[in-house]
């Protein structure tokens, strides 16, 4: 790949995340989406894209191509990684944002069909080459990595919070609850599924849910391995999620002001990724915010001697932006290898 050529990206799963990645790429100069696989009809995918973006007129459907002022992407109605011919599009990387194919064998299918690298939109179900969270362990990325996950929006927000505060304070353990907008795999009405509580109406209920972030945290932040428990409450909110983290600190002298000051100091060192909010914001205020963690200064409180509760906001758009950051990170590694 020459210095000037944009990354040629394939996307499988043109849902909310896929559409956000596509829109962000269409506004960039260094990434172009060349092929999209989804089970949806091209007309429906184009229609949904139009409802997602601010300027729908920038995106036209020409036959089976989605066209914007920067690039043309071929829409393919395909539902299995093994059937998607990535090789004929000459892609540099593929993002799987279906949420369906989290096992290694499916990632191998993408690679076998010509995707030089496969980036999973969410956490994997098997061991893969690397979990990369930009701003935390990007330095560990290797040019040889093929199967990669960029974590999830929740995992990223949690890791950033722990990474920053763990650099300033001795954190003995933590409990995280993600108060999460409902996701498309939940039913609007009560509908029998594989999980009892998730079979209940997303529109009517606060639904307690498990969260896998704690299981994978040690891969990104080894110092927190086994020290953090994670869970979720899915709530009847369309967008805008809240991270509620209770930290147990070793030093009982640590105050909420100390925590807030540390966040204020560190946030500017993660431009576009971490920010602090001094305002009394609510979930709808973070819709359209592409930060991965918006720390809520007013939310920090202390219980007893050693427990500090913190709040941080995030939404899916930030994760779409981080996925593109990871694509760029590996493009840079490829360039360095070519130049060597
Ligand atoms: N949005 C969130 O906050 C969030 C958080 C955690 C996890 N997730 C999960 O991550 C995944 C992606 O997130 P999203 O919000 O973009 O979901 P989404 O449901 O909006 O998008 C999924 C897309 O994948 C397509 N798809 C489904 N099965 C497919 C298949 N077999 N082949 C090709 N395309 C297929 C769907 O048509 C849809 O366009 C989902 O499974 C979701 O549950 C989402």
Image (cartoon, rainbow, N blue to C red):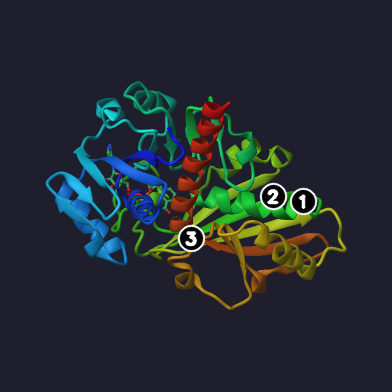
Q: Residue furthest left?
A: 63
Reading the image, the residue beneath label 1 is 167
The reply to whether the C-beta atoms of the residues labelled 3 and 1 are less than 8 Å apart is: no
The numbered mark, 3 or 2, whose residue comes first in the sequence reads 2
Q: Position of residue 329 (x, y in %)?
A: 53, 40
> Which quadrant of the figure has residue 275?
bottom right
Q: Is residue 6 above or below residue 169?
A: above
The numbered mark, 3 or 1, whose residue comes first in the sequence reads 1
In front: label 3 or label 2? 3
Reading the image, the residue beneath label 3 is 290
- 3D distance between C-alphas at marks 3 and 1: 24 Å
Q: What is the quadrant of the N terminus in the image? A: top left
The 10 Å Cα crowd at callout 3, few under 14, some 14 to 19, many 20 or more, is many
The reply to whether the C-beta atoms of the residues labelled 3 and 2 are less than 8 Å apart is: no
Secondary structure at numbered mark 1: loop
- 3D distance between C-alphas at marks 3 and 2: 19 Å
Q: Where is residue 32 in the image (x, y as percent from the top left)?
A: 35, 45
- Image-based side of 232 in relation to 199, left or right: right
Residues 321 and 4: in front is: 4
Residues 31 and 121: in front is: 31
Residues 279 and 334: in front is: 334
Numbered marks: total: 3
Q: Where is residue 308 in the image (x, y as percent from the top left)?
A: 74, 62
Determine which of the numbered discs, if any, sits on residue 49 in the image: none
At horizontal 41% and vertical 63% (from top left) the residue drawn is 239
Determine which of the numbered discs, if any, sits on residue 163 in the image: 2
Task: Find out if the beta carbon at label 3 lies less than 8 Å from the nearest ligand 1 atom.
Answer: no
Secondary structure at numbered mark 2: helix
Q: What is the quadrant of the C terminus in the image? A: top right
Task: Find out if the beta carbon at label 1 lies less than 8 Å from the nearest ligand 1 atom.
Answer: no
């Amino acid at each position: 790949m020459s210095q000037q050529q944009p990354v040629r990206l394939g996307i499988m799963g043109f849902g909310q995340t896929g559409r956000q990645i596509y829109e962000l790429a269409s506004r960039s100069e260094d990434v172009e989406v060349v092929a999209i696989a989804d089970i949806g009809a091209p007309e429906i995918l184009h229609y949904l894209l139009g409802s997602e973006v601010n300027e729908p007129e920038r995106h036209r459907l020409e036959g089976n191509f989605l066209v914007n002022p920067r690039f043309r992407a071929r829409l393919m109605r395909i539902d299995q990684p093994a059937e998607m011919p990535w090789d004929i599009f000459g892609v540099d990387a593929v993002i799987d944002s279906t949420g369906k194919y989290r096992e290694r064998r499916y990632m191998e299918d993408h690679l076998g069909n010509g995707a030089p690298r496969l980036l999973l939109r969410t956490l994997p179900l098997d061991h893969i080459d690397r979990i990369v969270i930009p701003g935390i362990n990007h330095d560990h990325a290797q040019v040889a990595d093929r199967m990669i996950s960029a974590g999830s929006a929740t995992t990223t927000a949690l890791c950033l919070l722990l990474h920053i505060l763990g650099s300033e304070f001795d954190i003995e353990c933590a409990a995280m609850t993600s108060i999460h907008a409902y996701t498309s795999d939940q039913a609007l009405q009560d509908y029998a599924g594989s999980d009892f509580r998730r079979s209940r109406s997303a529109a009517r209920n606060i639904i307690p849910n498990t969260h896998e972030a704690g299981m994978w945290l040690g891969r990104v932040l080894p110092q927190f391995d086994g020290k953090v428990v994670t869970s979720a409450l899915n709530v009847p909110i369309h967008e805008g999620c809240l991270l509620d983290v209770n930290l147990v600190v070793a030093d009982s002298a640590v105050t909420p002001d100390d925590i807030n000051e540390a966040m204020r100091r560190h946030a500017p060192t993660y431009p576009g990724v971490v920010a602090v909010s001094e305002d009394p914001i609510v979930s709808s205020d973070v819709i359209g915010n592409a930060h991965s963690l918006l720390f809520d200064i007013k939310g920090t409180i202390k219980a007893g001697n050693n427990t500090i509760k913190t709040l941080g906001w995030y939404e899916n758009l930030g994760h779409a932006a981080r996925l593109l950051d990871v694509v760029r990170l590996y493009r840079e590694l490829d360039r360095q290898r070519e130049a060597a």
